């Protein structure tokens, strides 16, 4: 667990980069938080009433929802009404100092206020402008608002999520919003690298729709090859087996057997080496085709086994397997603590940065709700 002893020293790879975060809700704020974790000086501008997610609870602390706390670390907050002249002038001043702007206003809103990309690119040619949107700015759905669950439905994600024969299901976390935020970070890093050569900023478009479609592997690859519409397969992988949740004598476990060697090792460990040579299961393709029969045989072998113990045993011999944990169990797991994936700053607890750099690691300098009136000096933060 990252503790307060390590909070103040900025050693991040993006130290000296100034980010003006004008976004709200999830995709944009997540982008800003990741950049901040890796050393950027992030100044977030919120409307006078605050980001909408301050109300997205319960739970709340001091009247602010946990949802907001999860996306706005390593930022200092300033409140401005961008629909008024004073707020617009102030944000221009901040853009002059910034390297990166992140925004997710409805397409055309900032242009209406005179502070959009089209107006600002000539005044601030160095500026990298990251636009997070639902569908991009043009095309049949261009400029329309987009939301995570709606994109999951439109992009085909819900159609492949759920039990076989059951109804389509939303993935139980805002996966489209989050991957869009990560794609926005990738875009910012690419543009910063290119600017080091050209000296010029550019516009980055990161849309929920495109990001949702980008998640369709292997279903899109399968459809491109065979033209068959992918169907829901529950916890099972459409191409690999056993890659599924299976029952044991105690709790269920997930088997993630990806090759013939792993399958044979598992069969030997279960006392059934003959399954490894059975022509129905000898190759990955045959195991996938004969998955129903294989699952029944495996669950028969596992009926007297303790699930957690078996998962540990299989991992120890090189067969990927895992107990099915709840969120509390996952966050309190020993390896979670070892990996510093829980951050604590005073009363604040949050998820840590998943990307670890050896010389310039992520640092945690500001808990959510920190106030700020301007960018820091380039060596501050």
Image: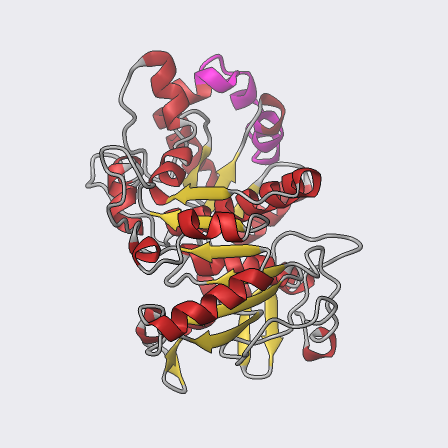
Q: Quick check: can you spot residue 333?
A: no
Quadrant in which the N terminus appears: bottom right
136 or 169: which is nearer to us?
A: 136
Residue at (45% x, 46% y) in the render: 179
Residue 361 higher or lower than 365, as above or below: above
Location of residue 319 in the rendering, given as x and y in whole percent from the top left corner? 61, 36
Q: Find residue 58 and report its image quarter.
A: bottom left
Residue at (58% x, 39% y) in the render: 320
Quadrant in which the C terminus appears: bottom right
Q: Is residue 91 left or right of residue 168?
A: right
277 or 119: which is nearer to us?
A: 119
Location of residue 273 in the rendering, given as x and y in whole percent from the top left corner? 58, 25
Q: Quick check: can you spot residue 52?
A: yes
Q: Is residue 135 left or right of residue 14?
A: left
The magenta stretch spans residue 368 = no
| Magenta-colored span | 263-286
The magenta stretch spans residue 267 = yes
Residue 133 higher or lower than 364, as above or below: above
Residue at the bottom extreme, as displayed: 62
Residue at (22% x, 33% y) in the render: 140
147 or 22: which is nearer to us?
A: 22
Q: Find residue 98 and report its image quarter.
A: bottom right
């Amino acid at each position: 667990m990252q503790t307060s002893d390590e909070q103040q020293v900025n050693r991040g790879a993006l130290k000296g980069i100034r980010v003006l975060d004008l976004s709200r809700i999830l995709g944009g704020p997540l982008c800003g938080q990741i950049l901040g974790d890796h050393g950027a000086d992030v100044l977030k501008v919120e409307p006078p009433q605050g980001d909408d997610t301050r109300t997205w609870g319960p739970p709340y602390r001091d009247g602010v929802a946990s949802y907001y706390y999860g996306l706005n670390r390593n930022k200092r907050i300033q409140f401005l009404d961008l629909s008024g002249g004073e707020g617009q002038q102030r944000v221009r001043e901040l853009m002059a100092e910034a390297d990166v702007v992140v925004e997710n206003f409805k397409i055309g809103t900032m242009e209406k206020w005179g502070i959009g990309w089209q107006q600002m690119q000539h005044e601030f040619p160095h500026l990298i402008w990251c636009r997070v949107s639902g569908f991009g700015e043009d095309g049949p759905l261009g400029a329309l608002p987009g939301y995570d669950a709606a994109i999951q439905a439109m992009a085909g994600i819900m159609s492949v999520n759920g039990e076989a024969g059951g109804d389509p299901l939303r993935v139980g976390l805002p996966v489209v919003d989050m991957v869009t935020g990560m794609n926005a970070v990738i875009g910012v890093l690419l543009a910063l690298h290119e600017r080091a050569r050209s000296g010029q900023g550019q516009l980055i478009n990161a849309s929920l729709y495109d990001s949702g479609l980008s998640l369709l592997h292997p279903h899109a690859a399968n459809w491109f090859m065979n033209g068959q519409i992918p169907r829901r397969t529950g916890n099972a992988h459409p191409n690999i087996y056993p890659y599924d949740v299976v029952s044991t004598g105690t709790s269920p476990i997930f088997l993630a057997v990806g090759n013939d060697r792993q399958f044979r090792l598992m069969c030997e460990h279960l006392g059934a080496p003959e399954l490894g040579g059975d022509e129905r299961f000898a190759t990955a393709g045959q195991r996938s085709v004969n998955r129903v029969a294989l699952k029944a045989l495996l669950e028969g072998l596992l009926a007297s086994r303790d699930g957690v113990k078996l998962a540990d045993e299989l991992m120890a011999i090189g067969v990927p397997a895992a107990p099915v944990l709840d969120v509390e169990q996952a966050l309190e797991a020993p390896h979670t603590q070892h990996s510093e994936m829980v951050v604590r700053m005073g009363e604040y607890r949050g998820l840590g940065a998943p990307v670890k750099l050896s010389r310039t690691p992520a640092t945690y300098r500001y808990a959510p709700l920190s106030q700020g009136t301007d960018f820091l000096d380039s060596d501050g933060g």
